[in-house]
Image (cartoon, grey):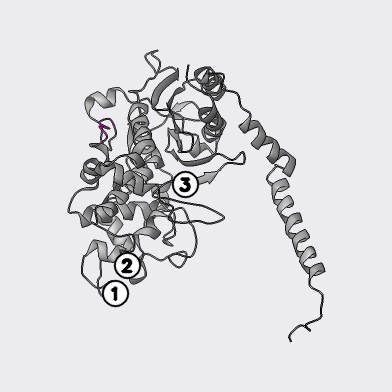
Amino acid sequence: MSQPANTPRKPRRRWLLWVIGVLAACVLITTGVGLGGWLALRQRYADLEDTRDLDVRLAAEARSYLATRPAGALVIGVVKAERVAIFGFGALPDGTVPDGDTIYEIGSLSKVLTGATLAALVSTGDVSLADTLGGVIVPGASDYTRESVAPAVAIITLQQLVTHTSGLPRLPQGMTEDELISADPYAAYDEGRLWQDLAHAQLDTVPGTSYTYSNYGFGALGQALARRMDQTYVALVAERILTPLAMADTALELSADQQARLAPGMVLGTNAAAPNWNLNALAPAGGYKSTARDMTAFIAANLVAATGERGIDRALTESHTTLRTGWDATLAYGWNIQEQLWGQRVFWHNGGTGGYTSYMAIDFDNQAGIVILSNYGDAMAGSNDLDALGLVSLPLIARISLP
């Protein structure tokens, strides 16, 4: 039934606006930040004075993190106004302080490297974001008439894979319970099993409809791109990203020299040594090891990519493109994009394996970035302490200069 023309509308609109305002206030209160607190945070960030002691401030936060980690070896790398500084805290087993050449498992920071590789292939026209997984695996074949992947999986696009909207579950359905609880859970999950599982995979949601973080999806993405380019995943990432940026210490398999520089992983709470992980076919989701020196080089290249004309600059600039916006996640090529409560917009990701935790963020507006590498498996123990250290550091790297 239509509403009479003379029915007043303004009171209803005011009531609706009031309800929206109350709901918004409830959300802020529920998250522990009222409107006044939010405004205070923004003002505090805007008024943060440049005391030119970023190193001292980060050291204080690092000591707090290491207070409950007696075997901790923590490294923080900072890029600020084209300057790079790397700080080590704690100690390695031989008593030395970790530095920019100390190697750590970086876990899901690997997804940013996989995303950048996809961006490189998009920038050169080798693939399109609209390409389907089935079409990438077997170029030119019908997405519906092959046995290599299930029909529902075949029509998943590369954009859906890189934005965690593919509908694939977090982990492959073919992994056993014994594997998942083992010391090295992914070691036996090879490419053969990946393709076999994709041939029978059942999706949690319709592709493109919702966000579900998926290591499975990123594993499939990296391996499919490698198959399209007729290369191994390792060779493809090296060619497109690592070699152009001289990231020689970023690898899936370590040389003898690199193995000697690997910080031993630790289990949080027990302080026992943690086995290293081999992610095998799921390496695109979290298999890389790296150093603060390599990761700050990656950050620095991202910060200046928009001003360059090299192939790697075009690839990195493409990787910053927002591909998905939503209330639950805003995403680029492997990057989460988030505006902090105090108003700072950052591209970030974190990572965790059995014995290591990592965090990386870039603030393009302030030309600053940070990477934090720890030899404790916080994520596996349900701790978000390293993420908290990253969040505390974000306003500091934006407003405080290196000495």
CA–CA distance between discs 2 and 1? 7 Å
Q: Position of residue 119 (x, y in %)?
A: 32, 50
First along the sequence among labels 1 and 3: 1
Location of residue 184 (image quadrant)? top left
Q: Nearer the viewer, mark 1 or mark 3?
A: 3
The residue lying toward the viewer, choosing from 348 and 83, is: 83
The residue lying toward the viewer, choosing from 70 and 154, is: 154
- Helix, strand or loop under label 1: loop
Q: Which residues are magenta?
A: 245-249
First along the sequence among labels 2 and 1: 1
Residue matched to label 1: 144
In the rendered structure, does residue 395 fall within the stretch colored magenta?
A: no
The residue lying toward the viewer, choosing from 67 and 63, is: 63
Circles 2 and 1: CB distance less than 8 Å? yes
Residue drawn at 43 percent across, 36 percent down:
354
Circles 2 and 3: CB distance less than 8 Å? no
